Amino acid sequence: MTPCRTAGAIVNWPRLVSACAGALAALAFSLSGIPAHAADAKTTELSKEDKACLECHARPEQAKLLGNGEKLSLQIGAKGFAESVHNTSGCEACHADVDAAHGKQPKKIESRRALALEMMDSCRDCHKKAVKQYEDSVHSALVKTGSDKAPLCSDCHNPHATKSLKDASADEPVVCNKCHQGIGKAFAASVHGSSGDEALTCKDCHRTHNVKAAAFADHLKKECVSCHKEVATSHASWLPNTERHLEAISCPACHSPDAKRRVNLRLYEGAAPQQSSEKVGVPKFVKLTNWADSTGAGLDARALWSLLQEFNQNGSSGKSVLRGRLEVQTGEQAHQLAGKARGIKDCDTCHRQGAMAFQSVSVSMAGPDGRPLRHEASQGVLTSVESIGSVGGFYAIGSTRIKLLDVLLLMVLAAGILVPGAHLTMKLLAKRARERHAAGQSESSEARN
C-alpha cells in the first residue's frame, strides 16, 4: 500500500491499522477479565476459616448418606458463595454446631426435609421479620398440617448462593414456578404477565413471605383495587347495581372470559360475618357435609338447610350463613386475565335461563391452612324455594333462577303500583259519591221549600 501524505506528514496506513487492531484486542482482553477479577476479589474477601471449609466442600464428590437412604451433596460452589449475601456472615453463622474438624461422631440427618426444617432456626436468627411473615402464611400453615411439600426457606432461597434483591437479575426464573408451573404459564400469557417492563410478578399480588390462601376472604380483590382504584366508578357507568355485583362476583369471573365459572356458597359466621375456618384436628366440615349428603349426589336444598342447622348447633360463635360468590373454577383460570376490551359486559351471559355460570355449584369452608374445603351441591339449591333461607344475599331478579322469587318480586312491584292506584281511584269515586249525595239533598230541600 502506498503511504499517504497529509498535513506535511507521511501516514503509513498498514502500520496504523495494525496498531489500532492491537489496541482494541488489548482493550477487549482487559474488559473480558473484569468479571473474573471481580469474582476473585470477592473470593479473597472470605475469611481464612471459610476458605478452609471450601477447600473440601468445593469438591463435587463430597456427599453424605442420610437416614432415609437419600444422598445429600455437600458441594458448595465457591464463586456462588463468594457472591452471595451470606459471604460476610461465614459458614459458622449457620453451622455453629459443626466444629472445624467435624468431630469423631458424624452428625445424623434423617432426610433433606428434616435438615431444611432444622436449619430454619438459623434463618430466624438474622431474618426475624421475614420468618415471622412466613409463619403467618399459607405455606407455613401447610407445614403445620403435616405437608412434606410445602416450601421451607431453602426451597426458595439457596442459602449458599442467595443474592440481594438489587443484584438479582430480572431474567432469573421465578421460584414460585417450581411448584406452580401451570399457574406460572397461564400468568405469563395474561395481560399482567406479558406487559413488558410493566409486567407484574407473583409478589406484587401475593407478597413474598406472607402469602395467603388465594380463595380466603377478599384480600386478592383488594390487591386488584389497589391498582384499579377507579373500579367502582368505571363499572357504575354501565353496570346496574354495581356495588352488589362487585361484592358477589370475583374479578376473574368477568376478566378471564374463556374460563369456566361456578357459584361458590361460602360459609360465614357471626353478626358481622367472617369467613368460617376449620380448626386443626377437627374436621367438622367434611364430617357434616358427608352426613347431609348421605347419597353422594350433591347437597340439595333440604340437605343444605340441614347442614346450616348443624353448624348453628355445634358451638359456632354466631349464626352460620352462606354467602354466594361467582368465581372461576381453577387457579390457572384465575391468572388468565385478558385485556380490558375482552372483559364480559353482556348481562345475558349470566342473567338467562340455563346460564353456564350457574350449572356448577359448590359449598365451601376455609380449611386450617386457609385453602377451601369444598363439597359439591346440586343445581337445585339455586332453583328451589327451600333455598331461599340458605342462599340469602345472593339474589337479584333472574339471577338465581328461583322462579317463585321472581314471581313474588314482580307481585310486590305490581302491588306497589296497583295499591296506591286503587286507593287513589277509590278516593276519587268516594268523593264523587259524596258530591252527588250532597247535590241530591240540596235539590230535595229546595223542592220542599
Image (cartoon, rainbow, N blue to C red):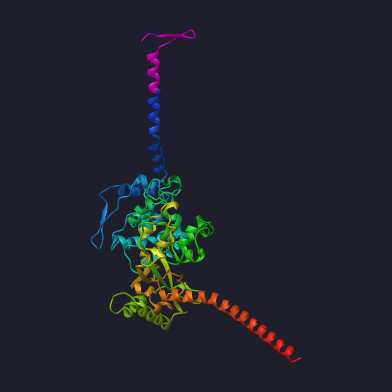
Foreground pick, 386 / 406: 406
Q: Nearer the viewer, residue 385 or 216?
A: 385
Which picture quadrant has residue 16? top left
Q: Is residue 113 left or right of residue 85?
A: left
Residue 323 in the magenta stretch? The answer is no
Q: Residue 103 appears in which quarter of the rendering?
A: bottom left
Q: Is residue 278 above or below residue 100?
A: below
Q: How many marks?
A: 0
**Farthest residue toward the left?**
69
Query: Residue 148 at what x, y percent from top left?
Result: 31, 64
* Quadrant showing the C terminus: bottom right
Q: Residue at x 39, y 26 (%)?
A: 26
Question: What segment carries the magenta color?
Answer: 1-22
- The percent coordinates of residue 429 (x first, y second) are 61, 81
Whether residue 215 is visible, yes or no, is no
> Looking at the picture, how far across and down is residue 191, in whole percent?
42, 51
Q: Is residue 171 above or below residue 254?
A: above
The answer to if 8 sits in the magenta stretch is: yes
At x 46%, y 65%, the residue is: 218
Counting from the top left corner in percent of width and height, residue 203 is at 43, 55
Q: What quarter of the picture does the N terminus occupy?
A: top left
- Front in this rendered view, residue 10 or 447: 447
Q: Quadrant of residue 374?
A: bottom left
